[in-house]
Amino acid sequence: MPTEVVGGRFFCKASGVRLSDFTAVDCEFSGCVARRGEGAPLNLFERIDLERASQMNCSIYEGVFRDVSLRGLKRLGDAPLFLWGCVFERVVLSGRISAVKINGSLLSHSKATTEENQRRREAHDLFVKEFYATSDWALDIAQAEFPGGISFEAIPGDKIKLDPERHVLVTRNALAASNWQALDFDGTALNIGLGRFERSSMFDSIVLAARSDRKWFKRDLAVLARLRDAGIASLA
C-alpha cells in the first residue's frame, strides 16, 4: 500500500535507493543524499507525490524519476537541490519551485582512473539518450513557477510540456542558423543557458523558462519574445 506522511522530517544518506508509492505533505528533507556506489543500481523514485516540500542541502546522483508530482518546493538555506545525471519520465512540477539545479554531467569517482571515469560518463550518456528515446514526455512545467530560474539543457526540450506564455523551445538548428549572441539579453543570463546548451548538451532542443520573480519576470518575457521574433524560439 502507498505510504503517506504529513509534516515529517527526513534525514537520509544512501546508495541504490528504491522509493515508490510514497506521498508526503508539508515535509522537510534535510541533508538527504542519494548516491550511486560502485556497482550499485541507479536510484529509483517512482509514483511519488510531494506537496509543499522543503529541502536543505539535498543531492541526488544518477536517479530515475518516474510518475512523480512535486507541488511546491521551498529551499531552506543557501544550496539548491542538486540533481546529477538524473533522468525524468512523466514528472509534473507545479506551484513555486525554488532552487533546483539539474546537471546532466556525472561527478568523477575519486578512486577511479581518468579512463574509467570517461568510460562511465560515455555509458551514462548512452543510457540517457536511450531512456528519452523511448519516453513520451519527461517533464510538465506548465503550472510551475521558478522565482530563481532553472536550466533544462540536461533534458530534451521536445520532451517538456510547457506554458507558451512563459516558456519557449529553442532547437539547435535554429540557434546555429542565427546570430543569437547579438540579441539584447538585458542582463537576464538567458544567453548563458543558451551557450551551455550549444556547447555541452547532448540534445537537439532546449526549453527556456521565464523567472517568476517580479524583478526579472518582464525582462525574461521580453527576451523570450525577442528570440521568437528572430525565429530562434518557438512556442512548442
Image: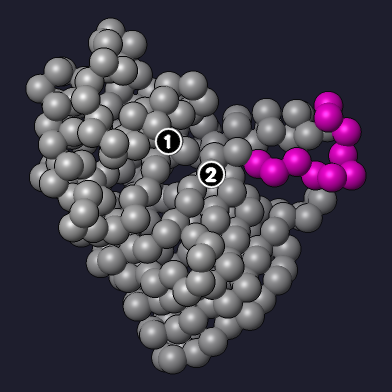
Q: Which amino acid type corresponds to the residue marked 1 in the rendered image? A: Glu
The residue depicted at 75 percent of the width and 41 percent of the height is 108
Indicate yes or no whether the magenta region holds residue 141: no
Q: Which amino acid type corresponds to the residue marked 2 in the rendered image? A: Asn
Above or below, comparing residue 181 to residue 101 in the picture = above
Depth check, front residue: 28 or 204: 28
Indicate yes or no whether the magenta region holds residue 112: yes
Q: Residues within 10 Å of mark 2 (few under 14, many from 20)?
A: some
Residue 29 visible in the displayed image:
yes
Depth check, front residue: 113 or 222: 222
The residue depicted at 53 percent of the width and 62 percent of the height is 79
> Which region is colored magenta?
106-115
**Helix, strand, or loop for circle 2?**
strand
- The picture places residue 48, in percent across and down from the top left corner, at 44, 70
Residues at marks 1 and 2 touching, judged by CB atoms closer than 8 Å: no
Above or below, comparing residue 115 to residue 9 in the picture = above
Q: Residues within 10 Å of mark 1 (few under 14, many from 20)?
A: many
Describe residue 74's horizontal placement relative to residue 161 as left or right: right
- Say which residue label 1 marks: 153
The residue depicted at 22 percent of the width and 49 percent of the height is 216
Kindly give the residue lying farthest to the bottom in the view shown.
Answer: 7
Depth check, front residue: 30 or 221: 221
| Picture quadrant where residue 53 is located | bottom left
Residue 2 visible in the displayed image:
no
Describe residue 58's horizontal placement relative to residue 25 as left or right: right
- The picture places residue 144, in percent across and down from the top left corner, at 25, 59
- Say which residue label 2 marks: 103
